[in-house]
Image: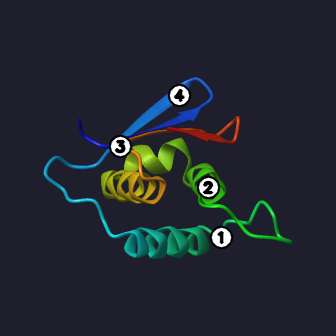
Amino acid sequence: MRPTVRLSFGPTDIHCHVPEGATPGAVEDARRWLDARFVAYECEPTNPLGKVLTRDKLVVLAEAIGVRGFEADEALRLEFARAATTLLGSASVHIDVDARTVSF
């Protein structure tokens, strides 16, 4: 089974697949990718007084990128899927942006 991230934006679902044959990235590489995109998209931490969880960063980044951003950029979808599945240690991840939840 190919690692997959399903992003739900209300009634719209976007599926991000890690390419077949791709090896999962190292956790530190995935963390650096997520942190760099979090800054590039000018995301705000959900908890400015404490530790920001990886799950929260993924939700906030997905919200910042939005449906159009994911639909327009295949490379971004692939890298997002690779980072999310690597960091969460699961081959199947569902991020519900509106509900701000992550499940796997």
Looking at numbered disc 1 in the image, what kind of residue is underneath it? Glu
- The kind of secondary structure element at disc 1 is loop
Q: Quadrant of the N terminus?
A: top left
Task: Give the distance between the C-alpha atoms of the residues marked 4 and 1, in whole angstroms.
Answer: 24 Å
- The kind of secondary structure element at disc 2 is helix
In the image, what residue occupies the spot 69% across and 36% down?
98
Q: Nearer the viewer, residue 71 or 43?
A: 43
- The kind of secondary structure element at disc 4 is strand
Q: Which residue is mark 1?
A: 42
Task: Give the distance between the C-alpha atoms of the residues marked 1 and 3, in whole angstroms.
Answer: 28 Å
Q: Residue 64 got which mark?
A: 2
- The kind of secondary structure element at disc 3 is loop
In the image, what residue occupies the spot 52% across and 42% down?
67
Q: Is residue 66 above or below residue 26?
A: above
Looking at numbered disc 4 in the image, what kind of residue is underneath it? Thr
Q: Which residue is mark 3?
A: 91
Q: Which residue is mark 4?
A: 12
Q: Nearer the viewer, mark 1 or mark 3?
A: 3
